[in-house]
Image: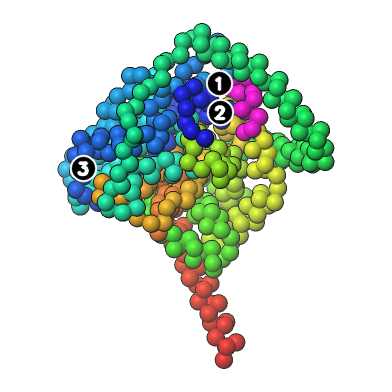
């Protein structure tokens, strides 16, 4: 479905607006490192302009009805100025990666202006070895982590020679609606609501068995989610009042490491990712003098509910499950076993379905109920931090002939959550992006090194297991 003028935000999209405060910003993005030399600012502007027609939402801004009886709309911005959104900066000498991380942290410490389209791209020159970076920053209401991979690629090509994707003609914005026009549109939507309900009732009466089965499954699923509320996440220094300033660290590793772990020790790549995050957090907690015996942290793990026919569309199609982080387990293989068993149980349970039922309900909830539900979704009773793993393209990408070398994803911090761990694979690599509150996470580098240590431990254990398997097979062959 096309991205149109006067599209209404989904309930989940609105939840990100509702939860945003001066200290809890709801934008996400990435640090993209390219081989040099950097393009000129003029060339980058021209390149972005030539691809903007592929993402019409990036020329649209929010419009709120005068009376908050419905969700806001996306409308064309008649004063859209590309130079405002594409910005230019340079690192001081020597242009280290640490300086790039600090620059990104400062950029992500600033809230996006809601009177304009909710995105920025920064061209950052002066990185060591002749490299440069792009820092992308987009509000979560505009795009989710899974569809964002598709949208980001509008700037990229799969060959060094850029593909010509010029628009057919100049962009002409639709007239900005008046307050009265939005109220009339809301009234028309309310008038249509009973018709939609009647259609769903008709479908239910035509297929009573399927309807009854669906209701029973949804009730069971909501019960699974309710259990999570009754069993709150443990109290740890990750869940404190946060400020507006951010720190950022990253960890580089190989996708091959995680495939080796999966093949030797079982489970999935995502199980291995959660295991090494748990190992890093165990080291971080112990470095702070916190005992980890019997402690299991809870991670909010977003899962896509985007169907194949909606790939490439903007807007959020996400639900969330509660993933285990068993920091009480010292042995890396045993820790993976705990994560694997728990995640298998979650897949067999209705927890993900329950999250989807809640997400669907949000599209029908009035704004007051929606605001309360949004706050509950980010409650510290449910989770200690967010851990999201986004699969990216496994082939090299190019922008204006320069190869993309590294992608470091950047998440967001809900209120009272001091850490977000985002992971993304690209072209044989897996990179971790750690976004944290500046004041309460002064030792974020300890966590980054802890994740590196945890990866090394698990890879070494996997290699030992593979050697043992080969040794066992050789006598059998003989």
Residue at point 32%, 30% (across, down): 169
At numbered mark 2, what does the secondary structure look like: helix, strand or loop?
loop
Residue 241 is left or right of residue 368, and the answer is left
Neighbor class of circle 1 (other Cα within 10 Å; few <14, some 14-19, many 20+) is: many
Read off the residue under disc 3: 39
Labels 3 and 2 touching (C-beta < 8 A): no
Residue 35 is situated, as x and y percent measured from the top left of the image, at 25, 51
Percent x, y of residue 49: 30, 34
Q: Does label 1 or label 2 sit earlier along the sequence? A: 2
Question: Main structural element of the magenta stretch: helix, strand or loop?
Answer: helix
Residue 368: image x %, image y %? 61, 18
Would you say 198 lies left or right of 325 here?
right
Q: Which residues are magenta?
A: 359-371
The answer to whether marks 1 and 2 mark residues whose Cβ atoms lie closer than 8 Å is yes
Q: Left or right: where does residue 71 sit relative to residue 114?
A: right
What residue is pinned by disc 2?
10
Q: What residue is pinned by disc 1?
A: 71
Which of the 4 image quadrants contains residue 469?
bottom right
Mark 1 secondary-structure assignment: loop
Query: Does the rendering let one see residue 64?
Result: yes
The Cα–Cα distance between marks 1 and 2, rounded to whole angstroms, is 7 Å
Is residue 281 visible in the rendered structure shown here? no
């Amino acid at each position: 479905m096309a991205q149109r003028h006067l599209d209404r935000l989904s309930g989940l999209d609105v939840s990100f607006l509702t939860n945003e405060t001066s200290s809890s910003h709801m934008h996400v993005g990435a640090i993209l490192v390219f081989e040099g030399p950097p393009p000129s600012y003029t060339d980058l502007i021209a390149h972005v302009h030539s691809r903007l027609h592929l993402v019409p939402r990036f020329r649209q801004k929010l419009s709120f009805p005068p009376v908050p009886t419905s969700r806001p709309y996306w409308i064309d911005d008649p004063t859209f100025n590309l130079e405002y959104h594409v910005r230019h900066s340079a690192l001081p000498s020597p242009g280290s990666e640490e300086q790039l991380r600090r620059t990104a942290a400062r950029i992500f410490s600033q809230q996006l202006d809601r009177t304009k389209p909710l995105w920025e791209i920064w061209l950052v020159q002066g990185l060591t070895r002749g490299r440069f970076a792009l820092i992308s920053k987009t509000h979560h209401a505009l795009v989710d982590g899974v569809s964002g991979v598709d949208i980001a690629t509008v700037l990229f090509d799969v060959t060094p020679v850029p593909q010509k994707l010029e628009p057919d003609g100049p962009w002409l914005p639709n007239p900005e609606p008046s307050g009265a026009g939005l109220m009339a549109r809301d009234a028309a939507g309310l008038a249509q609501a009973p018709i939609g309900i009647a259609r769903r009732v008709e479908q239910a009466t035509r297929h009573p068995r399927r309807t009854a089965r669906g209701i029973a499954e949804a009730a069971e699923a909501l019960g699974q989610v309710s259990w999570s509320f009754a069993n709150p996440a443990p109290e740890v220094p990750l869940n404190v009042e946060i400020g507006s300033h951010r720190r950022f660290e990253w960890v580089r590793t190989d996708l091959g490491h995680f495939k080796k772990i999966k093949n030797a020790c079982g489970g999935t790549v995502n199980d291995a990712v959660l295991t090494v995050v748990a190992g890093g957090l165990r080291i971080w907690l112990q470095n702070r003098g916190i005992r980890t015996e019997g402690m299991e942290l809870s991670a909010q793990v977003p899962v896509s509910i985007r169907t194949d026919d909606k790939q490439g569309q903007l807007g959020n199609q996400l639900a969330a499950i509660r993933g285990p982080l068993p920091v009480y387990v010292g042995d890396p293989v045993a820790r993976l076993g705990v994560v694997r068993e728990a995640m298998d149980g979650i897949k067999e349970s209705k927890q993900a379905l329950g999250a989807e039922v809640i997400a669907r309900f949000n599209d029908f909830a009035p704004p007051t109920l929606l605001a309360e539900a949004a706050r509950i979704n980010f409650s510290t009773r449910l989770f200690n931090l967010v851990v999201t793993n986004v699969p990216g393209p496994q082939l090299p990408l190019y922008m204006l002939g320069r190869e993309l070398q590294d992608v470091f994803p950047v998440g967001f911090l809900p209120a009272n959550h001091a850490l977000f761990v985002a992971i993304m694979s690209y072209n044989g690599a897996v990179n971790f992006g750690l976004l944290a509150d500046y004041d309460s996470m002064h030792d974020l580098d300890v966590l980054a090194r802890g994740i590196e240590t945890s990866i090394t431990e698990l890879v070494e254990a996997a290699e030992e297991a593979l050697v043992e398997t080969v040794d066992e097979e050789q006598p059998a062959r003989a």
